[in-house]
Image: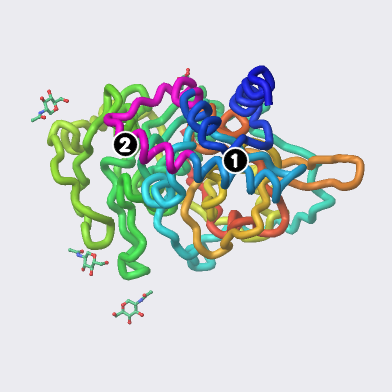
Amino acid sequence: MDLLRSLCIFFLCLSFGFGYYPEDDTSIRQLARLWRRQYDVEYKSFHQSEEKLKIFKENVKHINWLNKVYSGKTEFALNKFADTSPEEFQAKILMSKRQPPVFESSRYIEHSGVKFNDLPDSFDWVDQGRVTPVKDQGDVGTCWAFSTVENIEGQWIQFGKPMTNLSVEQVVECDSTADINKNNTNADCGVFGGWPYLAYQYVMKAGGLQTWEDYWYCCGLGGKPGTCEICPPGGYNWTRCGPPVPYCNMTQSCAAKINPKKFVPQLKVIDWKAISQDEDDIAQQLMSIGPLSIALDATELQFYHKGVFDPLFCSKTHLDHAVLLVGFGKEKDLFSTKPFWKVKNSWGASWGEQGYFRMLRGSGTCGMNTAVTTSVLMKP
Ligand SMILES: *[C@@H]1O[C@H](CO)[C@@H](O)[C@H](O)[C@H]1NC(C)=O
Ligand SMILES: *[C@@H]1O[C@H](CO)[C@@H](O)[C@H](O)[C@H]1NC(C)=O
Ligand SMILES: *[C@@H]1O[C@H](CO)[C@@H](O)[C@H](O)[C@H]1NC(C)=O
Ligand SMILES: *[C@@H]1O[C@H](CO)[C@@H](O)[C@H](O)[C@H]1NC(C)=O
């Protein structure tokens, strides 16, 4: 193959998620070099760079396989996670696998009774300018705090308030809520995962949230400037939550940083609600309530690039990632109509479809319908 054609393939691969990457060693090294330049990645040592190259190569093969299997449906690509092994991805970015929560029946919003055919073809809170820009959780497991805070942002906007980035870091650093109804086995664990339904309870108890700009996100920046080593909040339980950080700077603790005087005035979470597992009902509630917090099994989402995500192997009962449901629609081609959900992720705007992904609607894909919740705000 001539140089021009191979370079062409490289550039197409990187910019458009071209379906197939060459797998020979020379091409892999070249691809890895281009990828590192694009994502501004530097390694500490030759050893690390060789280890990362091995992972990169395995990922290239995996992505090629995915693109073959899901051809015409979902595209996968070398994205920001191209040098992260699936194991590391699972351990650091996703949360430990967890069963869908079951709440007492009074917690659920009454079923709307709506049927698929009663719903509009499409609906999108983003198009209506009601969703803040996509954020990046970095290399820690804080998705649950993003999902919670972004739901609250949506509820705030529903009251006609200006679009406001609220503080995710406050929730990560300050919230150690545990569920006494579940013998405290469900708990919020900072960078090691948590539950939106518990985080709403933290915000209720705390009395409010600061803005993102006031209490900015620093725990997931992977050593880049501005990174913080956060101290666990009071009540944090190491047995339940994970290994202790060897060192933390007390200036980076909730106690030192939080400032209730700076809570967004009038923003008060007073309750939270759950929504049924019926996806037609979820669509109806999404339209009347606003963006909803959901959780799913996101194992195969690592290299998602575009299209409607509908993995063959995906658990409906082992949730490991929390995100924000923002809309739905139907993808039509000559032969079929595929209903999908639109979801806001917290892996930066360069990931997926400008930071969003779409997934199949109507068959409980990856358990996305099993932990749908929203906060309830006081009327300002
Ligand atoms: C929210 O934060 C983003 C950066 O993450 C910024 O571009 C945007 O202007 C902020 N929006 C508001 C309303 O403050
Ligand atoms: C909580 O612990 C008690 C005593 O160990 C046990 O009887 C009960 O079944 C547990 N409840 C849950 C929800 O796990
Ligand atoms: C910490 O969590 C473990 C496991 O859930 C539990 O057995 C223990 O009682 C907890 N400790 C405290 C002080 O809550
Ligand atoms: C703790 O953090 C503060 C502010 O970020 C910094 O000025 C100080 O040097 C740090 N202390 C230690 C011992 O790292």
- Camera sees residue 128: no
Question: Above or below — where is 220 with respect to 129?
Answer: below
- Mark 1–mark 2 Cα distance, whole angstroms, equals 25 Å
Q: Which of 83 and 58 is in front in this view?
A: 58
Magenta residues (range): 34-56
The percent coordinates of residue 309 (x first, y second) are 66, 46
Residue 155 is covered by the magenta coloring: no
In the image: residue 73, left or right of residue 7: right
Image height check: is 261 above or below 285? above
Q: Label 2 amino acid?
A: Gln
Q: Which of 236 and 207 is in front in this view?
A: 236
Name the residue located 47 percent from the left edge and 65 percent from the top edge. Answer: 99
Disc 1 and disc 2 in contact, CB within 8 angstroms: no
Q: Which residue is drawn at 55% across and 40% down?
A: 60
| View quadrant of ligand 3 | bottom left
Which percent across, then down, holds residue 167? 37, 32
**How far across and down, in percent of the image, does residue 127 sit?**
67, 27
Q: Residue 304 carries which label?
A: 1
x and y percentages locating residue 195 in the rendered image: 41, 53
Rendered image quadrant of residue 108: bottom right
Q: Nearer the viewer, mark 1 or mark 2?
A: 2
**Residue 124 left/right relative to 208:** right
